[in-house]
Amino acid sequence: MEGLDFGKNNRILAIYSKLMNGQVVNKAELAQIYGVNPKSIQRDLEDIRNFLDNQIVEEGIPNQLIYDHKQKGYRLEQSNHVKLSNDEILAVSKILLDSRAFTKKEMMSILDKLVESCVPKKNQKLVNELIANERFHYIEPHHHKVFMDKMMVLGQAIKESKVIRIKYTKMKDKAKVERRLEPLAIMFSEYYFYLVGFIQGIDKEKEFENANDPFPTIYRIDRIEDLEILEEHFKIPYANRFEEGEFRKRIQFMYGGKLQRVKFEYTGESIEAVLDRLPTAKVLSEEDGKYVVQAEVFGKGIEMWLGSQKKVINILDNKSS
């Protein structure tokens, strides 16, 4: 598009903007809008097509300009290899809906954008029909709070190792507290997003059940009332860095606490469900449908889970590490 006059440049950019916003452009209508010959618009579209072809080669961005016979106009479409298949989008949509992590308005917006941007146009109607019933009956979390505006701010603070100050409503007694934190990770579990971090400047003897607990604390992000990113940086030695994957394997229901090793007898129907629930679990022995299992876990969440499985689980040992 180098060497074009100013008027044509503006026209091409306007047409390109329409296409990028998902609009279908009609050559005759564009000619009338801009007061030029339809052949001029055709050349503009060819310039845009050449630009998109260069983007594919140089940057791997697979937008293609195609003519849609049904809509009698030109539109942009991504190559199908970067789109989700019907199976994939259906699976992702079902997981999202089942997560119940967002308000209804947020969830519907996410699903609309997901289908619009990730599914070929010819499949969008089918996908929307397949999830229509669950969308209609979607129940949002009881806190009814919009908190996504905090997610990227927290992510940036984690990336840059910046100390943050939060005002937080505690779950147990609804008391409001202020905390200075070294944020380490954002995690999701059982309907909620959580911030994991170390507390600065707190009386652990007074505030913690275990004052010598070396592990980070966990905060539900929807309960963060106020958030401030400070200019102060923190540093954690590489050898002591926080690893979300390893932490996630060992924690149940996002309840913090001591690292402990549990050993129990399982007599239920699906040992796979136990191993999926406790990723660190190992089957030590099996005899006549009775499994002896051992797992390494953090905190009190494991007690909640074991208590809910009394009919099929018999605790053999529970030791703090």
Image (spheres, rainbow, N blue to C red):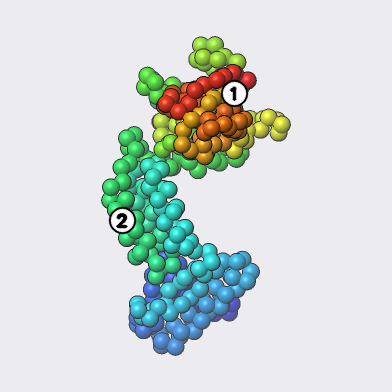
Report the amino acid beneath label 1: Arg
Q: What element carries label 1?
A: strand
**Viewer-nearest residue: 31 or 138:** 138
Labelled disc at residue 132: 2
Question: Cα distance, mark 2 to mark 1?
Answer: 44 Å
Report the amino acid beneath label 2: Ala
Q: In this view, does 11 lie above or below 116?
A: below
Image quarter where the C terminus lies is top right
> Where does the image place residue 295, in percent across and percent down from the top left?
58, 29
Q: Residue at x 46, y 77 (%)?
A: 66
Residue reaching furthest front?
288
> Where does the image place residue 144, in percent across and percent down from the top left?
32, 37
Q: In this view, does 286 lie above or below 320?
A: below
Q: Residue at x 34, y 43 (%)?
A: 103
**Viewer-nearest residue: 203 or 196:** 196
Q: Are marks 2 and 1 in contact (CB under 8 Å)?
A: no
Q: Mark 1 points at which residue?
A: 261
Q: In this view, does 292 lie above or below 48?
A: above
**Viewer-nearest residue: 208 or 158:** 208
Within 10 Å of the Cα at label 1, are there few (<14), some (14-19), or many (20+) other Cα atoms?
some
> Where does the image place residue 65, in percent across and percent down from the top left?
48, 75
**Nearest-to-viewer mark from 2 and 1:** 1
Q: Is mark 2 on a helix, strand or loop?
A: helix
Labelled disc at residue 169: none
Q: Is residue 132 above or below residue 237?
A: below
Q: Residue at x 30, y 42 (%)?
A: 139
> Where does the image place residue 76, in percent across and percent down from the top left?
46, 71
Image quarter where the N terminus lies is bottom right
Q: Which residue is drawn at 46% across and 84% down?
A: 42
